[in-house]
């Protein structure tokens, strides 16, 4: 009797192990969803040079006045914190008119002054949530001043050659990416991911993960 029970226990354990192994083997296949170029993401006609060829570049093109970008901000920030060191993530402002150019200057001014983290959400909230225009330098300077930035220092940096050069580069970059809206994400200067094509903002980041893995494998094979 004891022998029979013992044998049944062994058989049950073996069957359980086999079932677990089958589930484990099937899991990567389920996770590795195949995304299709031209459907889930776009391949740029002309690749855009990245700032660090040794890393996989991921660039989010955004605008502070875009409520979709406001909603995407916490998602992409959480995503960024989970990335390996070989992923170079950064943001680039979209510029379609004079007001957006001012907002791009605000973005690069915050970076130059070392207050990007402090000013990122106030700029988003003021423009995308409260609906304020921030249509001139004085209004932007007042917002920065409300968060402890000296106005004279702000105005000096805002009008500096360095900041204006970065704005021009951002404009040229967005044109090279063929940006059609915000937020959009460009992976390694080759692939453009949009909310519409991906099916949603969380899905955008899933497509980005797929493309990062694709580029990582390509770099490893070189």
Image (cartoon, rainbow, N blue to C red):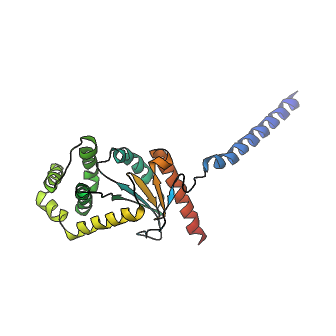
> What x and y, as percent, mark residue 89?
41, 59
Residue at the bottom extreme, as displayed: 222
Which residue is at a point 38% across and 46% down the rendered structure image? 74
- Give the residue displayed 49% in from the left and 45% down from the top: 199
Q: Is residue 182 left or right of residue 218?
A: left
Expressed as whole percent of the image width and height from the top left, the position of residue 91 reads 36, 58
In this rendering, would 111 be left or right of 82? left
Toward the viewer: 193 or 8? 193
In the shown orientation, is residue 217 left or right of residue 93? Answer: right
In front of the other: 203 or 28: 203
State whether residue 204 is above or below residue 56. above
Residue at the far top: name it. Answer: 1
Q: Is residue 58 above or below residue 125?
A: below
The x and y percentages for residue 181 are 38, 52
Q: Quadrant of residue 152?
A: bottom left
Question: From the viewer's perspective, is residue 163 above or below residue 183?
Answer: below
Task: Decide if residue 73 is in sight here.
Answer: yes
Q: Quadrant of the C terminus?
A: bottom right
The mark tally for this picture is 0
Q: Quadrant of the N terminus?
A: top right
Find residue 215 and report its image quarter: bottom right
- Res. 114 in view: no
Q: Position of residue 190 (x, y in %)?
A: 49, 64
What residue occupies the far left of the structure in this picture? 152
Q: Residue at x 58, y 54 (%)?
A: 36
Residue 92 found in image quarter: bottom left
């Amino acid at each position: 009797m004891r022998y029979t029970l013992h044998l049944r226990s062994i058989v049950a354990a073996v069957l359980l192990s086999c079932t677990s192994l089958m589930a484990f083997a099937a899991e990567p296949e389920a996770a590795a969803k195949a995304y299709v170029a031209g459907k889930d993401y776009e391949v740029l006609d002309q690749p855009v040079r990245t700032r660090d060829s040794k890393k996989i570049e991921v660039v989010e093109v955004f605008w502070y006045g875009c409520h979709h970008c406001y909603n995407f901000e916490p998602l992409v920030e959480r995503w960024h914190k989970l990335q390996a060191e070989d992923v170079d993530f950064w943001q680039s402002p979209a510029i379609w008119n004079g007001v957006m150019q001012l907002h791009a200057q605000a973005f690069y001014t915050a970076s130059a002054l070392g207050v990007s983290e402090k000013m990122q959400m106030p700029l988003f909230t003021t423009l995308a949530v409260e609906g304020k225009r921030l249509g001139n330098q004085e209004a932007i300077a007042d917002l920065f001043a409300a968060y402890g930035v000296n106005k004279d220092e702000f105005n000096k940096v805002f009008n500096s050659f360095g900041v204006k050069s970065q704005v021009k580069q951002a404009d040229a970059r967005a044109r090279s990416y063929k940006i059609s809206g915000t937020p959009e994400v460009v992976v390694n200067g080759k692939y453009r991911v949009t909310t519409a094509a991906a099916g949603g903002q969380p899905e955008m980041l899933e497509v980005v993960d797929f493309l990062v893995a694709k580029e990582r494998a390509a770099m490893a094979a070189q």
